[in-house]
Amino acid sequence: MPATISRRVFMGIAAPAVLLLAACGAGSTATSGSTDTSLTVAFAVEPENLDFTKTAGSAIPQVLLNNVYEGLVTMDDEGKIQPQLASKWTVSDDQKTYDFTLRDGVTFSNGDKFDADAVKFSIERVKGADWTVDLKKAMDVVSTVEVVSPTEVKVVLSKPSRDWLFRMTTRIGAMFSPNGVSDLANKPVGTGPYEVTKWTRGDSIQLTARDGYWGDKPAMKTVTFKYFDDPTAMNNAMLTGSVDIIGSMQAPDSMNQFKSDSRFKVIEGATNGEVTLSFNNAAGPLTDIRVRKAIKYALDHKAIVDTAWNGYGTLIGSMVPPTDPWYEDLTGLYPHDPAKAKTLLAEAGAQNLQLRLRLPNIPYAVAAGQVVKSQLAEVGITANIDLLEFPARWLDVVFKQHDYDMSIIQHVEPRDIAQFGNPGYYFGYNSPKVQQLLAEADQGTAEQQNTDMKAAAKQIAEDAAADWLFLFPYLAVADSDLTGVPKNAITESFDVTSIART
């Protein structure tokens, strides 16, 4: 769901019977030459709670994934699957059976031992009623989880899936202690190098490095995620030294003040965060494809990114970022053509159309929404903007109740094109053809996967199931003496485990 890139060109499932050996774990060696072992990272969106098994959006895993929770595998900053709590694994010839060897001596932050029983519990829990986020569907392909020994687990899939191991690098692959899930919204219990030690609601979340971590100790003993509603206040906090990193710039027009200051370094990387103009395909005026197409023709996407985000961002034309193997430039499908938009609206009998544009109160969405509203007015569409507090209010009204005509949100989950295969998702898009293409892509060869995924992306775009305003850029600012700051926004996580001071 909503919710960041060259980060992650997924290399596909391992070849049959290929042994993948451990090279690293989360919390890779981060030596520090400084006595300052505290870090403050600024972000705009505070989590509603700390339970990403029940709450959608990226704010929770941004803080917790890889820092507090770990999985059997993880995604590195180059987009490759790496071992984490599993030291190695093999894949059967039919690509249905995975045999994982687990690291020994790993414990959860509550003192419980991590072992094969915890793996079985965690995977089966995703398939049960305790997980409610839509991403859990990726675990449906798991048929059985067998405890072979305390350090060996066999996972059998019901059918070959090129996607499953990749999904295990996301939140659904996080490992939990059976004794540590009673209050996930307030007390996360993971195997990672940090634990949550303080949450000042409305202000910050503090992580503290924990004793007994199985891997290399992080250089930073305390990490504070601090939240700012106002982009100017966030920038001022960076300029005055109150924060050490801006994890995601919310005022890109202010980048030059950091680029010209030797105290800071500016990081410009890739993301897979599609800033999506969501359409309600299941109810209201946008059930008519002519209306959806008219909206797409009415919008000048370059003007939107130039005006709303100071020219930072890439035009994509689909729900596939350039870092996915099946990316295809589809920006030419709906060139800016207000006359054609008006013709389509007339054919649909939709003159003087009034639409509810329900936006999260996030800077990029508000800025882009104003430009969209102005451009739609030029073809006779009135977009009535309704700002909703994010995450709680937006998730309830738009994402859960589907009570909207249009919205704007950055979808940051990896390979989230799969959401268009789910009619129950908030898009309300129901295409048997796309559903079949996505299913066949998951079970075919790498070549077949690329072909089918391209076909699915093109069909979704041709159906005007949504519009993609731009690919969100990864723009971060850090103190110049910091090393190990993420170069790309490659997952939902902002991994602080390798950050150190020189």
Image (cartoon, rainbow, N blue to C red):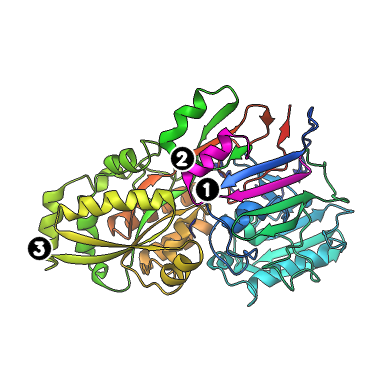
Considering the numbered disc 3 on the image, is that residue within a helix, a strand or a loop? Answer: helix
| Magenta segment boundaries in residue numbering | 220-243
Mark 3 is on which residue type?
A: Ala
Residue 95 position, x and y percent, is 64, 57
Could you tell me which residue is drawn at 65 percent across and 63 percent down? 50
* Label 1 crowd bin: few (<14), some (14–19), many (20+), radius 10 Å: some
- Between 470 and 293, which is closer to the camera in this rendering? 470
- Between 117 and 435, which is closer to the camera in this rendering? 117
Q: Name the residue under label 2.
A: 473
Considering the numbered disc 1 on the image, is that residue within a helix, a strand or a loop? Answer: helix
Does 320 sit above or below residue 236?
A: below
Mark 2 is on which residue type?
A: Pro
Q: Residue 346 bears which disc, if any?
A: 3
Report how far apart the C-alphas of labels 2 and 1 lie in the structure: 28 Å
Quarter assignment of residue 77: top right
Q: In this view, does 100 lie to the left or right of 424?
A: right
Quarter assignment of residue 54: bottom right
Residue 231 position, x and y percent, is 47, 44
